[in-house]
Amino acid sequence: MTRTHHGAASGGTRRSPRTAALAVLVALSTVALTLVLPADRALAACTGNAVACENQLPGSTDDWDIFGAGDDSIQGFATATSVNAGSRIDFKINTDARAYSIKIYRLGWYQGAGARDITTIAPSVPLPQVQPPCASDASTELYDCGTWGVSASWNVPSTSVSGVYIARLIRSDGGDSHIPFVVRNDGNTSKALFQTSDSTWQAYNKYGGSDFYEGKANGRAYKISYNRPYSTRGAAYGRDFLFSNEYPMIRFLEQNGIDVSYVSGLDVAADPALLPKHKVFLSVGHDEYWTKEQRKNVTDARDQGVNLAFFGGNDVYWKTRLEPSQDGSNTPNRTIVDYKDTWANAPIDPVEPTATWRDPRFGDLGYGFGPENALIGTLYQANSDDFPMQVSAEEGKLRVWRGTSLASMAAGTKATLADHTVGYESNEDLDNGYRPAGLIDMSTAVGDTPEYLRDFGTTVSPGSTTHHITLYRAASGALVFSAGTIQWSWGLDSSGDGSDRPAADPRVRQATLNLLTDMGAPATTLAPGLTAVTASTDTVAPSVTVTTPAAGQSLTQGSLLTVTGTATDQGGRVAGVEVSVDGGASFHPATGTTSWTYSGILTGNGASAVQVRATDDSARTSVPVNVAVSSGCPCSIFGVATPRVADPGDAIPVTVGTKFTSTRDGYVSGIRFYKATANTGTHTGTLYSASGTQLASGTFTNESATGWQTLQFSTAVPIEAGTTYVAAYYAPKGHYSADSYFFGRPYDAGVLVASGGAGVTNGVFAQGSTFPTNSYQQSNYYVDAVFSPDDTIPATVTATSPRSGSSSVATTAVATATFSKVVDPASISFQVVDAAQNVITGTTTWNAASRTATFNPAQGLASSTVYTATVNAATLAAPVQWSFTTVDPDATPNDCPCTLFDDSDQPSAGPADDSGGVKLGVAFKPAQSGQVTGVRFWKRPEETAPHTVNLWSGSTKVAQAVTTTESTSGWQEASFASPQQVTKDTTYVVSYTSSTGRYGYTSGGLSNPVVKGPLSTPAGAGRYTYSPGDAPGNTSDANYFVDPVFVPSAGTRPTVSSTSPGDGARSVPVNDHLQVRFNTAVQPGSARISVVRASDGAAVEGMTGTESQGTTATFVPATDLAPGTRYTMTVSDAVSTGGPKMSGSVSVSFTTSGAAACPCSLMETTTQPVQSDGGDSDAVTLGLRFTPTTTGFVKGLRYWRDANNTGTHTGTLYSASGQKLASLTFDDSGTGWQTADFSANVPVVAGTTYVAAYYAPKGHYAADLNYFANPVVNTPLASVDPGSVYVYGDGFPDHSYASSNYYVDVVFDTNDDTPLQVASTTPASAATGVPLGTSVTATFSRAIDPASLQLDLRDASGGLVGGQLGYDATSRTATFTLAAPLSGATTYTATVSAASASGVAMSAPRAWSFTTADTQPPSVTTISPADGASGVPTASTVTATFASPVDPASVLFTVARSDTSAVAAGSTTYDATMRTATFTPTSGLADSTAYTVSVSARNTSGISMAAPRTWGFTTADTQPPTVSTTSPSPGAVGVTATSKVTASFARAVDPASVVLTVKNTSTSASVGGATTYDAASRTVTFTPSSPMAGSTGHTASVTAVNTSGVAMAAPTSWTFTTADTVAPAVTSTTPGSGATNLAAGTKVTATFARDVDPASVQLTLRTSGGVAVTGTTAYDPATRTVTFAPGAALASAGTYTAAVTASNTSGLAMTSPRTWSFTIADTDPPTLSSRAPAAGATNVGLGTNVTATFARAVTTTGLSITVKAPNGSTVAGSGTYSATTRTLTFDPSADLTSSTTYTVTVSATSSGGVPMTSPASWSFTTASQTFSLYTTARTPSATSTSTTPTTVGVRFSSSRAGKVTAVRYYAASTNTARTVKLWAPDGTLMGTATTTQTATGWRTATFATPVAVSAGTTYTASTYAPVGRWSTTTFAYVGSYTSGPLTVPVSGGVSSAGDVRPTVPSSTNFWVDVLVQI
């Protein structure tokens, strides 16, 4: 149990255990006769069963029980917890008595007395015996009274029956107590073995001051001794002692004659051979403390087939160990050790951990056992709960509840069992990884608990608990039951300690009996009200069907998988289903039984990935059903699991991680983590080795707000099986997820395993961003790795050289590509092409260490050339392509535009680490005047675009420009909007602004002047500035590579280098922009472009433009060009930037696209790829997805061929789904566009998608990326996204990459010139079974000329078939309609010819043949057996003969039972000669059974029978008749005299043969009546002609013959007895009603008028207060008189009421009990019947009056009551006496003092003048009281405006010692204070607490453990206000302030800045208050 569980209940009233027990015992003793077995049954049960024999003996008639723990003045213990019969047991007793005796009792049933007086022994030493002090050890708080001397001994007779015994110590002068002990019978083999919970009795035993829950300096004992008297029963209603839970079970077991013997827990721990001698082991009630040896022996016994019944709760909770006594004798096993390391949160036990069995922090507590549910099925979770068990209708039908009303509940209902049966501690069925296989729940109740366990045994809080009783069958076959509640036995018997015990619940009693019977310990003396049952014979486990997932389904490992299905059971009920989704490594309970579902995280893979098993209510579990699931990796540890604590609130930057290993070699491709909403910031993930080496890292991107986040490394990391790695991530804002103690066990996810277990450090963390090594509470921070056995991350190219998009690349450069991981060198393809797609020859090398491929050109690269490099490798997702531009040739001086530096001049250093925004420049001057058109500068790749350039004259900015396009590195140029005039010999500065400060430079590069052509620099020409608006005026020798572009007065004459479209181009888009490219830059607007229509010279309006000083001029038509039209474009007048004008003009012609201009293509015919060879050398099919905008024909295909694209190329036209429509082979010629035609034009439909493809067997295809990023429309064709597709190999292309264009095209036309073809015919060629009326059709490939159509049809002899020919133009179908049906089974030939609508004829007529069908269905002519035949031999075959031949394979015979439809197994044969089908059963048919036969078949043409032929027959009956049920049932009694007598037969019988007779058993006289037989129910009924004689035995007899004439072997006979109908009546009683002055020993009698059932007689005697009088009852059948003899003298002056009831011999009860009263003479002195508060009461209210109620009236003379305080002072008050209630009341003048023990003394004289023997005296203790400085109604006058973090508080003292339970403070809503502290005078922090309250008002923070404070000592209570705003009332403490015992001194307010102890005194009240419990 948990730390807070102990302590008596507060408030309310308490019924003393003694009173409760005695009341029940008296009540039971008054009805003893009703429970005594008849002598013959008792004798039978006694044979071989010592307990049954023992309980036939009379029980004790004395008052053997005691109150609580008994009298303190006489206490003792036995020197052993158990003794073997025939041995001696010693008692050590401490008492000052001069005389006492010891009575020995055995506990049992004993007709309800509960115990039997065995013997009385006397002390063996002179009295009084003075005992020495007990031994003690302050360090462990052990108290060992073994130092006492032996006081008495009992030589246990060898014939003693094993049991729990009581030694009652009885002082001769008053006072008694108990010593419990066990008598064993070593070597006995009783069916059941009862273990006492003696270790728990001692755990709660505070004799000597400490127990395992309370104590002195340690707060509890670490060791407790068996050498002590038990005080356990005196606390908490005795709930932790023998009489609360074990005693009721003992009564039940022995009442029912269970063959049981008894041992102590020590015996079980010490003797491994003990348990296997028995069939059932019983642990009952509160069996909380177990040694590891005890657990091992019980576990081993289970595994040897011994059944275990845990009728308790909180069982097997603490692990203990045993040590010898510490009294000097060193007696073994007399000390129980339990340091409770769990509560200490540390291994404080110096020998070995003693903790809760479930606590994983302390390693193996013994033999590898884990939490207790691994053994018992449930484990403790709830304390101080109190509610009844409940059973649903479905649960009520389980085997455990058989014989109870629960078995017949209506669906959807539930039953509530006895109150308090769940409590006061209970267990749950938890799926914690230790749940036994096949565990079933058999009840369900949900209730609240104030203390729900939240960890391994320390932390509790209010919650809800779900209780089940459970059962499982171990592998040995042993059954293991768990009641899961301490108070199960409260439902067995109402006797025992405890408040408000319910009446026994017959359902709980029956269930207990059922369980014991199934376990092999049945009842032999069955108690009334219980039903005899037999053990289960069900050995067949349930069957399971899995509905989802489907077998073979592919699922994601780590995903949440829902498994559903059904289960069935024969012979029982399905009680539970368990599912495994990890390949059988673990199973979990599903929801539901016959229909069930379970959801779990899938980690299993393969044939047995998912497994399901079911268990029935006999605990038979099926072999798992396996479902194959494919769920291979990639996988992780936690999958979709989510944390219980998503955010513990820690905001510190931290790195958290998980240690893991893999079961196989593989790769980690990334890191995952679970993110809480507040876990913000940039997260980085890292994979470490176990030693902290960083293996991979990256930054998480695209995170969601919460949930799992995933980082994929750029390169997968190889890992080795069995090696530890750490997956970690950095949370810069904290708020990570954390589940404490998650890694108390390893977490196995199939492939990946996170380590765990005792001493294992997992769940690691480190503050900041570093390798995590710390661990706290084995927490799971939900960090995960993504694993795959293969490297699933496609290789990437991480770096290229030259960089993509770079310029000014040296012509000597080599191209390199660095891969993210190692690739197969043989798979590397590296190609470099120039702008003309010429492949550069060279060699490729591979450096495995740097993972770099290098392409070395055979010769230097050309200058001023754009090169495209393409690299591919086997693991790249796609080829990687990039371009770069080589340097321009060094310029010839004075060949302008001129610059200071050539493209080959490049920085030698960099990047600089400077400030972004620095302005860099160069000073220069021209040697002649001219224009500066722009500025060049060298860009490093670290710089970002755009850049600003300037021209400066002195400090004046002359011009500014911004780059519009930039390469990634190299020389860049920005042109001014207009050239800037510069004057010769004048110094200027050009500059650019570095965006990042990461520029290139050459130190000293301008230390000397530079002269180049007309430009020069001075020495030290470098210029820079950090001022944004200033000219760069600072000088430097460094060259920053900034350059003016200077143009003097001269230039190049422009010429046209190319046009687009090219000359003669076709299929030019109508919205095309027309371009002209010149050999040199031209002045904007100087080029004149005109476009005219070729047919009439009409000019096309449009606009001409060029790029600024660019080489390209563009003509944009004002509107789209006309489709299908030829145009001429002419360009002239272009002027270069240097001034010269082009000579003449240049003209080109082209034709636009359009249907009228077809044949046409999607791409303009002169289009050329940028990259004519993508470099891929693999065989590949490339395609174009397109659709025509108008219906037409594809005549052929085109593709662009590079010189390297060799081999035989084939082309194919596909439908969108991949259907091949036409194929061709290209006859290649050179490079460029290749075209080939199909053998026939292929019709295509407008709006339908097609794929044009060609196969490149050697690769090297053209490929331009992003060409189809947007759809291309060129009427009448358009691309369909994705525009280009490919597939490796020769096949249908269905992959796409980067919207690439592979330059595949179609030749499309609107006209068709191919010969006409027949597309399809009906019937098809060579068709058979053609219906006779079928029309003949031919469908053509395209429209035809109907006049050209001819079709004829001829039979096999060539004769023409008559009919009519028609043509449907819509479907292009010719139809020949028959004039008459064709002949059956005949072959016909059809011939058709025609010409297309355009006049193209078929190349030859189309002819085909088909055969007509046989049209007659089969029919059956004869059958056997005949329809309706009966008496058919069971060995018969079944036959059917057909009228004509049938297909043998089609014959289907079905022979099925008519009642169940079960199909008989057998085989079918067919005799073609006889046309007979025969069905031969595999085994004989069932006898006396109706069968239905069905046969069907098809003829040889496939025509089936119109309907199957069916008939029926019945087999012969070969069994003699048997009677299945009778009414009345055999042996029935109380049968109504008018009842009908019936017998039902198991099978049909001949009605004429049935004879049923009824006779008087004693006289053999026949009863008259009539007999009828109902054939439907097979029941014969005898109806008496008049009522049968009452209370008389009758015999019924029946005979019959079956329908086949087989007679019964003998008549079936049975007997029954009719009922007696007269209720009993009492004729006389003694004493008579109203008799008085009777003797105290008077017996009570009642005499009946006629015979009654002796077992039904109940005579009770009760006092006037309703208390039952104990005694014995006997019934004399001869005189019909029942006599009650009181067990003791009746009380003087007592009025008693007797009540008698009985039933007649037929069970008819008296309508009401007969009652009468009488009075005994008064002779006794006064006694108290009750007192309040009760003796020993605690927590008594301070305003309570003290009362004493007398048993009888007293006089006021001599009547007195006094109440005294502990110091002896008398409490002032007044006393009153009420004669009516006989109550004396003392009313104190003022409230009593809290936490104070008062003593009450009462004296009185009876009304007869007899004084009390001695005054009555008792004590009670008042309740504690909580005091505070202020009431919550008081509020402050102001709130401070200060926002300074401050601690404010109050100093206080108490006049009495007490405990501070809480600190409260008044706060406005602006005050964010949450934490309070309590400080000792010396500044020691005594306690801290927090509150969640935030609203304005009093906020209370309660300490987890109240803090003790001493009287007269000043303490400080404080609260920390992080943002100030505390409450104030000034001058409140200018004087001292007192409230009750609490005082605040002068200036008692205190404060200090920050979160510290406040020390600055103040008269201000800061409204901090304390709650002190005194």
Image (cartoon, rainbow, N blue to C red):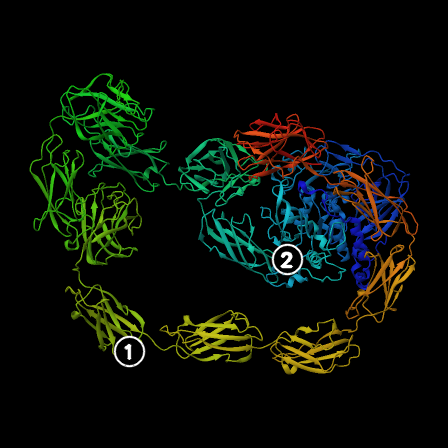
- Horizontal side of residue 906 vs 1787, given as left or right: left
Of the pair 764 and 1206, the residue shown nearer to us: 764
Q: Nearer the viewer, mark 2 or mark 1?
A: 2
Tell me where residue 226 appears, x and y as whole percent.
Answer: 77, 40
Q: Secondary structure at mark 1?
A: loop
Residue 1909 position by quadrant: top right
What residue is pinned by disc 2? 391
What is the quadrant of the N terminus in the image?
top right
**As drawn, 1750 above or below 1632:** above
Residue type, label 1: Pro
Tell me where residue 110 appears, x and y as whole percent.
Answer: 81, 56
Tell me where residue 690 appears, x and y as whole percent.
Answer: 50, 33
What residue is pinned by disc 1? 1381
Assess disc 2: are there few (<14), some (14-19) or many (≥20) residues with their C-alpha within 10 Å of its C-alpha: many
Of the pair 459 and 838, the residue shown nearer to us: 459
Of mark 2 and mark 1, the one earlier in the sequence is: 2
Q: Secondary structure at mark 2?
A: strand
**As drawn, 147 above or below 494:** above
Q: Is residue 346 visible?
A: no
Q: Residue at x 28, y 70 (%)?
A: 1323
Q: Residue at x 57, y 57 (%)?
A: 593
Tell me where residue 887 appears, x and y as whole percent.
Answer: 22, 29
Q: Residue furthest left?
A: 1144
